[in-house]
Image (cartoon, helix red, strand yellow):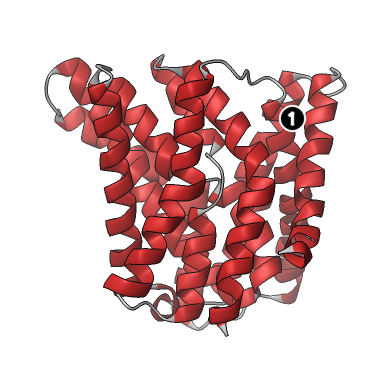
Amino acid sequence: MWDILLQTLPFFALIALGFGAGRTGFFTPEATAYLTRFVFYFALSAMLLKFSANLSLSEILDWPFVGAYLTATVAIYLVATAVALIRKRGIEEAAVEAQCAVIGNVGFLGIPMLVLLLGQNAIGPIMLVLAVDLIVFSSLIVILITGSRDGRVSPAVLKTVGLGLLKNPMIVSIVVGLSVSATGMTIPTPVNDFLTILGAAATPGALFAIGASLASKSAERLAVAGWLSASKLVLHPAAVAFAALVLFDVEPYAAGVMISAAALPVAGNVYILAQHYGVAPQRVSASILISTALSVLTVSAVIAWVQPFMG
């Protein structure tokens, strides 16, 4: 545990550095927005494209893996939804809280950190987790909120969801990379070097951007935010572990990567959606802040637990 904590500390130190820069005003919210845009559309996309271009679809696509992750995530999603409804929150707020309970920061934190800690073979499983999160749950929250407001799920909503997926640079990068891999083409050296240099900016840029964005978050509604943070950091990885190791018998290494990815703190894009639709943004803000702070210990503990059986 102590060794893993020491290995994860540099990642969280970069987040803390960004947080300090944002808190002191050295890095303004506008600067943070532009850095996040650079990482999202350029650096992280380059990293994902290069990673996926060196993989085949058969290496990534693992149906027992998908079944285990989807089953566990849906279970926690339903628990969080039920708790929200019991508290007499509407469908919209329930959808946002459920998103906090299951959607971790796989893109900005998981990819750079888990690949370095668990090895290059973690790339495929991480991409599969990311794809399920983006395709299934990022679509689901939009459908639930807009459907609740309109009283029905219209074709226009489904079109919006579809276009959103097609415009997501992470999805596009993975698809392009796998397409290159499927053709058997070798990426030309200058292009490969370009992707390597640009992709290298993803890790420090993403972690710094996480910290800087946290500087504008508030820790209001602590009781609910604490529950959602516990769901994300404890219940979600526990459910994923049970599904992967007991129900679906996922290969141990892939299972360890999946469990580690499930232990990541609440993703920043949940706040973007909450703010966009005007649904409980402060609650989401507090959940991101608390879960990220606590994840310094919880993520290290989960990785220390999975490493022995990963082989």
| Residue at 33% in and 78% down | 249
In the depicted structure, whether residue 18 falls above or below residue 249: above
Nearest the camera: 27 or 156? 27
The reply, left or right, for residue 297 in relation to residue 86 is right
| Residue 223, visible in the rendered structure | yes
Which quadrant does the C terminus fall into?
bottom right
The reply, left or right, for residue 65 in relation to residue 213 is left
On the image, the x and y values in percent for residue 116 come to 71, 67
In the depicted structure, whether residue 310 falls above or below residue 224: below
On the image, the x and y values in percent for residue 296 come to 69, 47
| Residue at 74% in and 75% down | 189
Q: In which quarter of the view is residue 105 placed?
A: top right
Which quadrant does the N terminus fall into?
bottom right
| Residue at 21% in and 28% down | 156
* Residue furthest left in the image: 152
Q: In which quarter of the view is residue 47 placed?
A: bottom right
Nearest the camera: 243 or 131? 243
In the depicted structure, whether residue 43 falls above or below residue 115: above
On the image, the x and y values in percent for residue 167 come to 44, 42
Q: How many marks?
A: 1
Nearest the camera: 62 or 71? 71
Given the image, on which type of amino acid does mark 1 rest?
A: Ala
> What residue is shown with label 1?
212
| Residue 168, visible in the rendered structure | no
The reply, left or right, for residue 188 in relation to residue 87 is right
As helix, strand or loop, the secondary structure at mark 1 comes to helix
| Residue at 31% in and 42% down | 77
Crowdedness near tag 1: few (<14), some (14–19) or many (≥20) residues, C-alpha within 10 Å: many
On the image, the x and y values in percent for residue 87 come to 28, 19
Nearest the camera: 269 or 114? 114
In the depicted structure, whether residue 220 falls above or below residue 36: above
